[in-house]
Structures are given as structure tokens and as C-alpha cells.
Image: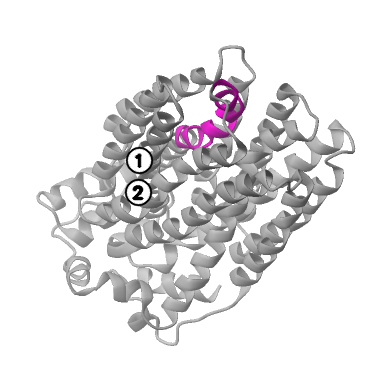
Amino acid sequence: MIRDMIDTHPMSRYQLRVVAFCCILAAAEGYDILVMSFAASGAAAEWGLRSSQLGLLLSSGLIGMAVGSAVLAPFADRIGRRRLSLFCLLAINAGMTIGTFSADAVQLGAARVLTGLGIGGLAAGLPVLVAEFAPQARRATMIALLTTGTPLGGVVGGLVATSTFGWRALFAVGMGLTLLMMVFALWLMPESLEYLAAKNPPRALERINGLLPKMGLAPLAAMPVADSAAAARTGTVRAIFSGRTGVLTALLWLAFFIATASYYFAASWTPRLLVESGLSKGQAATGGLLLSLGGVIATVGFALLALKADKRRLTSAGFIGCAIAFAAVSAVMHGGLVGVLLTTTFLGLFLNAAGAGMYTIAPDIYPANVRATAMGWAATAARIGGILAPALVGVLLDLQWTPRVLFLLFAAPTLVAAIAVVVRTRPSNPVAATPPSGTPSETASSAETASS
């Protein structure tokens, strides 16, 4: 019932405000994710770290993110999207504070794990909240806009990194940003209507009817019985892994793994590898900044194209572009500053387009009562790729692999991800394979996504 109401009415100003705040929150989260890549050279110089040690430090935040996605994200289906988001922001702020005052690499690594825990839970929940407040016709566009947050945060990080205040200033800025987001979240972040309908917590009807008029929708006379009944009878594991939906999940995880491994290799190591290729620290920071700037352009462009074009084909095209861009960076690495900066910009563009596409594909596959859990587990598969890639690159650098070979190494997997995305897998019985959340539109949405 609620899903039908949202899908059949245009987005209200209130819904747009919710999406806009989630985008701002994602930008702060993106800054916190990428801060270590900009701080890496300064921390390595201060503590005399080897490349393999630096790789572990870059991966430490991703380890926390993987655990957060697997362990914390499912709580969004139990205690609500809003309450979990506030808890995750608290954890992020604590991690950034410890990172600001860390005395050695071990303390900084522990701070990054704590920060990653919060980011992992938040990153899985934000796309779900946006998806649940957006009508089906605008859902892909709204989620794609949300993904501008990570590269936009990287742009801010690149600007701070070019300052003369040192690497600790990067963490201090992140600490302040996260604290500000906590304050605004208490005011601007609502609970998901679909969560309230599916789980029926205390005062659910009152809370739903407090939100519906803000969205220009009529209040309900009673709780939608079908929604809460569906939540009670749906098994989480069955809803995610049964039948052909399980195949969709496997393909989704593979593409997420490759997308995140490729992204975090580029985001974490590009400034450092550019220094090793002969660029100054300032030029390398500019390269990292342009990588993120290309991502902002890509995600906004994806959001506009998703209004009309098929999001699966757009995502596959993004992965193919990644392969070409990785090869291009490898080819021009010693050919001059202009070529390097241009190719890193295009690499950021395609990496973020592919990532934006993955987050537009994923939420519609699953019913509301397991959606945050499914997104959290998919994000865990993605984070494993993000953990392995920076650490592996550090080891390969110690084994004398060159930056040119490393960029070329990541071209082939992105082609595999492009194939995984375009494989058409249609559940023979969407209702059985993916139990609905109780509304006809929810079932139709899952079936449409599976076959798109």
C-alpha cells in the first residue's frame, strides 16, 4: 500500500529534502573513506613506513567497513534506518578523533577500523533509505545522485591535502564534518516508511501518518496488514539466496567485489603511485583530486541518463570504460603531466559511473524487510575487494612491480564485471524467489529489476 502510494505520486519537496540530506551525508562519508589516501604520504614520511605497511594502513579502514556492512547493516532491518545511521555517525566521529591524535601507525590503523565500522553500516543503509523515499520512476536517478557523495568527499579531501597544515589536519576536518552531520541527522533524517510498515514497531501508525502528509499523501486509517504479515513470514537468507534470486545475488556480489577493488586501488594508491612515477607531491595530490572530480561528473551524468536509459547497460558501459582508462593511465604514466591528469580524470569518471550503477541495480532486487541486510552483505563482498586491493598493491610494490604494470593489472577484472552485469537472469517465479514486502508494486519492482 505505502509503496504504491509513493510510486504513483510525484516526489514532494520533503522527499527531495530527505534525498538531498542523504547526499550531503554521503559526501561527508566519502571524505572519511578517502582521507587516508591523501594522508598516506605524510604518515609514511613521519613514521618511516614501507609500502606493504602503508598498504595495510590503507586497508584497515576497509576491514572495518566490511565488518560494519556485514554486522551493523542488518540492524537497520531490526532497529530502523535512522537509529542505526546515528550510531554509525557516532562511531565514525570517534574514529576520526582518534586518528587526529594518533601517536603511531598502530593507533591510526585502529582508528581507521573504528571509522570503517561506522562507514560500513552507514554506506549500506543510505541507498536503502533513498530508494524507499523515491518513487520507482526516479529511484535509479536518486540513488545515482547519492553516489556523488564519495567522489565529492574526495574532492574536499584533495583540496585539504594541498594545504600546508599537514596530514593530521585531514582527520581534524573529518572529525568536524561528522560531528556536524550528527547534529543535522537528528533533525533531518526520518525513519523509512517501508521499515515502519514491514516491522510495525511501537507507534508505527502514528509515525507513518506524521510523515505521509509532509509528502502530500493521505494518512492511513490502519496499519497495512499485508506489509507486516509479509515481514513476519519472510526468511532473510531465503529471500536473498533462494532460486534464481540467488544467482542474481552471486552476480551482484562479483560485480561489487571487482568495482570496489578497482576503485580503492585507484583512490588509495593513485597519489602515491604518481609520486613514485616522478610527479611532485602537489602534482600527485592534483591527480587524486581530478580522480574524484571525474567521479562527481560521472555520477551526476549517470543520474541524468538513468531517467531514460537502461541502468544495467549504463553500468556495464562504465565497467568497459574502466578497463580502457586503466590501460590509458598505464600507457601515459611517463609521458607527461597533462596526459596523466587527463587519464586519471577519465578513470575516476568511469569507476564512479560503474559504482553508481551497482547501487542503482541492487536495492530493487530485494523486498523491504530484508533490503538493508541484503545491501549490507553485498557491501561486505565489495569491501573484501576493497581490503585486498590496497594491501596486494603494497606487497607488489615491495616486489618491485612498477606503477604502470599495476594500473594495467586492473583492466581485465573490470571487463569480467561488465559481463556479470549484463547477464540476464529472470526469476521464473519472482514471488517465490523473492518474497514480496506485501505490495504488488514491490513484487513488480523486483521482477523488473531482475529482468532489466
Quadrant assignment, res 5: bottom left
Q: Which residues are magenta?
A: 28-46
Q: Secondary structure at mark 2?
A: helix
Q: Residues within 10 Å of mark 2 (few under 14, many from 20)?
A: many
**Residue drawn at the location 46% of the way across and 30% of the way down:** 105
Residue 348 visible within the image: yes
Q: Which residue is mark 2?
A: 68
Residue at the far left in the pictured view = 202
The amino acid sitting under disc 1 is Gly
Whether label 2 touches label 1, CB < 8 Å: yes
Q: Main secondary structure of the magenta part?
A: helix
Name which of mark 2 and mark 1 comes first in the sequence.
2
The label number, if any, that marks residue 375 in the structure image: none
The amino acid sitting under disc 2 is Gly
Q: Which residue is mark 1?
A: 118
**Residue drawn at the location 33% of the way across and 46% of the way down:** 216
Q: Nearer the viewer, residue 162 or 302?
A: 162
Give the x, y percent position of residue 14.
Answer: 37, 39
